[in-house]
């Protein structure tokens, strides 16, 4: 049963998606979230590169920022276009450029960053799985800020609920809903970052390249599949096979790849 007494609900903190605007030029929270995630992640990558046992130099970590940015933005946007609304963007291709309106796919961004890592490692003669382990520890930072941006943008809200912290989102109709964006920020961002931080320092998984990356993929898939039970499915897709959402279905291959990386026999480093 959904609460009828709206006064008892946690109020949605309406925040203007535009931080400041100068004529046609606008600085949006959505863009700042991506900048914050990439910048903080870049600095953390450099910190990891400074460790004595790291085979990735500070210069490599510094230069990879541009590659990661292209992978995240291009992959995330094209992934959303192809996975979620291909017919809409095929009819109006100009919409593809309107990234400030939202519409980024983590799974597409992951593929974009993976391609960027492959090309970067080939050019620098680096071991792909070593860099992948480092990038995996950085990724939750970007996920955290990205989910906060979803919350500020009043998008990707949750399913109707009567929990005390349910909110009435301006674009979500009159019913109170789960603030699922915050659930994802907590699980995909904070919890996953802490898990990888502890495991990378308290275990010897870093000595086996690919294990930390595998743990990240499994952790992300588990967090995303869980949060999707509280998140309203995209109206243009709804529920798919066996009542699953697109986010859950796309996360299953990630979990399988993560298990392979985590459990595969030790072999030569890639």
Image (cartoon, rainbow, N blue to C red):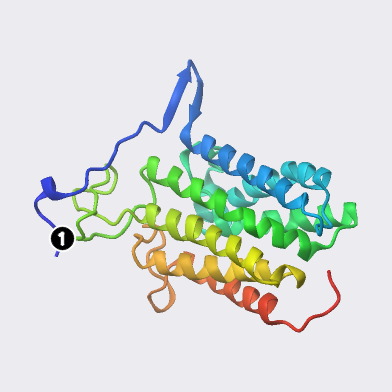
Residue 102: give x, y in percent of width and height: 48, 43
At a point 72% along the width and 61% down the height, the residue shown is 132
Q: Is there any visible trace of residue 250 in the rendered image?
A: no
Q: Is there any visible trace of residue 17 in the rendered image?
A: yes
Q: Is residue 168 above or below residue 25?
A: below
Residue extending furthest toward the top? 23
Q: Quadrant of the C terminus?
A: bottom right
Disc 1 target residue: 2
Left or right: 37 in relation to 182:
right
Left or right: 175 in relation to 220:
left
At a point 83% along the width and 43% down the height, the residue shown is 59
Q: Is residue 190 above or below residue 171?
A: below
The image quadrant that residue 63 belongs to is top right
Residue 1: give x, y in percent of width and height: 14, 65
Left or right: 148 in relation to 220:
left
Q: Nearer the viewer, residue 41 or 19?
A: 41
Q: Nearer the viewer, residue 124 or 40?
A: 40
At a point 64% along the width and 48% down the height, the residue shown is 72
Residue extending furthest toward the left? 5
Residue 150: give x, y in percent of width and height: 43, 46
Considering the numbered disc 1 on the image, is that residue within a helix, a strand or a loop? Answer: loop
At a point 24% along the width and 59% down the height, the residue shown is 160
> How many tags in the picture?
1
Q: Residues within 10 Å of mark 1 (few under 14, many from 20)?
A: few
Residue extending furthest toward the bottom? 265
Residue 172: give x, y in percent of width and height: 27, 49
């Amino acid at each position: 049963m959904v609460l009828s007494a709206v006064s008892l609900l946690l109020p949605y903190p309406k925040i203007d998606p535009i931080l400041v605007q100068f004529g046609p030029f606008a600085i949006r929270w959505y863009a700042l979230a991506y900048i914050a995630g990439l910048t903080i992640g870049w600095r953390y990558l450099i910190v990891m590169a400074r460790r004595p046992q790291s085979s990735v130099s500070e210069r490599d970590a510094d230069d990879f920022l541009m590659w990661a940015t292209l992978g995240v933005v291009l992959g995330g946007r094209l992934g959303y276009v192809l996975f979620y609304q291909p017919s809409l963007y095929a009819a109006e291709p100009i919409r593809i450029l309107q990234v400030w309106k939202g519409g980024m796919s983590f799974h597409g961004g992951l593929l974009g960053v993976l391609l960027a890592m492959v090309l970067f490692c080939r050019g620098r003669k680096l071991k792909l799985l070593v860099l992948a382990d480092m990038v995996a520890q950085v990724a939750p930072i970007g996920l955290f800020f990205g989910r906060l941006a979803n919350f500020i943008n009043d998008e990707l809200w949750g399913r109707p609920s009567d929990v005390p912290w349910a909110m009435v989102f301006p674009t979500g109709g009159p019913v109170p809903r789960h603030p699922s964006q915050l659930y994802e920020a907590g699980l995909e961002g904070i919890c996953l970052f802490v898990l990888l931080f502890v495991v990378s320092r308290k275990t010897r998984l870093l000595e086996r390249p690919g294990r930390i990356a595998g743990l990240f993929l499994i952790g992300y898939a588990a967090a995303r599949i869980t949060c999707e039970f509280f998140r309203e499915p995209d109206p243009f897709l709804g529920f798919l096979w066996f009542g699953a959402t697109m986010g859950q279905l796309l996360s299953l291959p990630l979990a399988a790849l993560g298990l392979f990386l985590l459990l595969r026999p030790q072999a030569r480093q890639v």
